Image (spheres, rainbow, N blue to C red):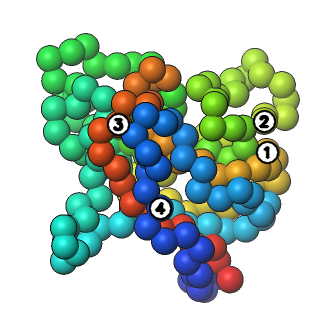
Amino acid sequence: MPQPTWRKIIERKKIPEELGIAWTRVLDYVTPGKLMKIEVVIDEKANPPIKGKWKPADFQSECAADGDYSGTEPVGKAQRTDALLSSAPLGALIGRIGGSTADKSIDTPTAPATPSRLVFSVGRHCVFLVPTTPTGALYLCVNDNAPNMVKVSSDLLVDVYEAL
């Protein structure tokens, strides 16, 4: 299979869109079966430089969108083990299809057989095939527990692409 040709559909979207919110709506609707790519913008030549880092709640310093792999943050506090997406490090960029900006939990194995939202790890770079269910908007957020998802004190910029 040849490499896809990408078309940028969202340029330099700020995540979080504003401080104090959890989920940032990036697209109103993602087309089922569409191949998509999300990339964190890094541009050291920009003025000021865009480093591709943000500062999650209680972190001593900024981290990349891949989160805290070392498990050393937050400094001086107990490591949080209740992040929304357990498969991604604390502080990682995560995505969600479906649901709303008010969601603070994810569907679990005990939830209905047809999930209303799908949460996945994004990090600095993610290519994914939009599933047939659930459908809805594409949201991005920091991977943390519900009270701390709204406490990111800096932001990332992301570009979103679709395959042609």
**Going from the N terminus, do you reach mark 1 or mark 2 first?**
2
Give me the C-alpha separation between circle 3 and circle 1: 27 Å
Residue 36: give x, y in percent of width and height.
62, 67
Query: Which residue is identified by label 2?
Result: 116
**Depth check: 113 or 152 in front?**
152
Q: Is residue 88 visible?
A: no
**Depth check: 8 or 155 in front?**
155
**Going from the N terminus, do you reach mark 3 or mark 2 first?**
2
Q: Residue at x 79, y 45 (%)?
A: 134
Q: Secondary structure at mark 1?
A: loop
Query: Which residue is identified by label 4?
Result: 13
Query: Which residue is identified by label 3?
Result: 152
Residue extending furthest toward the top: 78
Give me the C-alpha separation between circle 3 and circle 4: 16 Å
Q: Secondary structure at mark 2?
A: loop
Three-letter residue code for mark 3: Val
**Going from the N terminus, do you reach mark 4 or mark 1 first?**
4
Q: Nearer the viewer, mark 4 or mark 2?
A: 4
Q: Nearer the viewer, mark 3 or mark 1?
A: 3
In this view, 62 is above or below 20 = below
**Going from the N terminus, do you reach mark 3 or mark 1 first?**
1
Give me the C-alpha separation between circle 4 and circle 1: 23 Å
Query: Which residue is identified by label 1?
Result: 134
Give me the C-alpha separation between circle 3 and circle 2: 26 Å
Give me the C-alpha separation between circle 1 and circle 2: 5 Å
**Callouts 3 and 1 close, C-beta under 8 Å:** no
Give me the C-alpha separation between circle 4 and circle 2: 25 Å
